[in-house]
Image: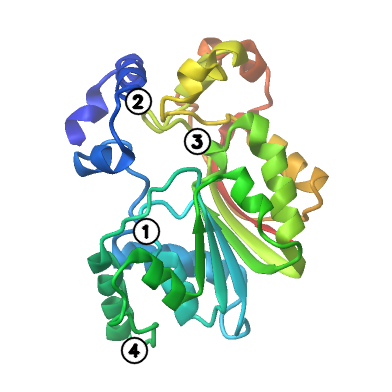
Amino acid sequence: MRHMQSVPWQLKIAAKIVLARLPVSYHSWKKIGLFKQGGMERPEYALRIFRRHFDAAGLAGKAEGFVGLELGPGDSLCSALIAKTFGGSRTFLVDVEPCASTDLSVYRRMEAHLRQLGMYPPNLDHCRTMDDVAEACGAEYSAEGLDSLRKIPSASVDFVWSNAVLPYVRRSQFVPTLQELRRVQRQGGVASHTIPIKDIIGGKLNDLRFGAGIWESPLMANSRFYTNRLRYLELLRLFRETGFEPEVIRRVEWETLPTPRRKMAKEFAQLSEEDLQVSAFDVLLH
């Protein structure tokens, strides 16, 4: 909502701390436009995101029968339907909570959109539940975060992707998550990740104002505005340390830092200009 853009970041944080503690389900919040997990219910958007990662990974035309893994599918299982259409044999969809829509019209719209583009998605006419849709797409949807990743067989996945998900993995679980992603990715497989490096309370760097003791506390970390605040160079280092070979294919930088250094917690204020200037990047992990 546009009027929210003018609300001070302090008030946004305070409001989200309160709202996140109300006994309201994710799907109820989504109906009123709060805490929405992306736009994966929209066919055009879902296809664009999948193709962005699929094409970046160089899989177009040479990945028949591939096994895929999406980290953080968000509001739908549409990625699995698209992956099946593009030649996938099986797709793992892993999230930290059950956000995916159970409304079958979401998946029927996705199927219709793909057919309108001359593609051949699975036929969903016989589907009566979301589980039926998953079965038709060769998909396995699990919403237990790291525990879900641990259940995937080793060296079983050819293509891993995530879109604006890695920054929201808890810092304490980030390395274990990378280790699991490395374990399941086959030799010769590839991962594609789009990684914004900014806060989600205004798209700036206000999350860097807080020391680790405050930011990683349950009060802040469980209020749906959490980011792990890992910076560009540290992310590249962690990718290498967990056995990946990162290849940065796109990098976006701030023209001017939206939050001045003097306002940042000491641990961030002392970082290099290169680390702070990067606002987003796309990376392939080999």
Task: Report helix, strand or loop for mark 4.
Answer: loop
Name the element at disc 2.
loop
Q: Which residue is mark 1?
A: 76
Instruction: Please give left or right for residue 123 compared with residue 283 in the image.
Output: left
Q: First in sequence, mark 4 or 2: give its number.
A: 2
Q: Are marks 2 and 3 in contact (CB under 8 Å)?
A: no
The quarter of the displayed image where residue 132 is located: bottom left
User: For this rendering, which residue is in front, 84 or 6?
Assistant: 84
Q: State the SS at label 3.
A: loop
Q: Residue at x 47, y 19 (%)?
A: 220
Calculate the distance from the C-alpha at mark 4 to the C-alpha at mark 3: 40 Å
Marks 4, 3: nearer the viewer: 4
Q: Would residue 73 be seen by someone viewing this image from the given angle?
A: yes
Frontmost of labels 1 and 4 is 1
Q: Position of residue 72 (x, y in %)?
A: 49, 51
- Placement of the N terminus among the 4 image quadrants: top left
Q: Residues within 10 Å of mark 3 (few under 14, many from 20)?
A: few
Q: Which residue is tagged 2? A: 20
From the viewer's perspective, tell me whether residue 165 is left or right of residue 150: left
Amino acid beneath label 4: Gly
Q: CA distance from mark 1 to mark 4?
A: 22 Å
Question: Mark 4 sits on what residue?
Answer: 118
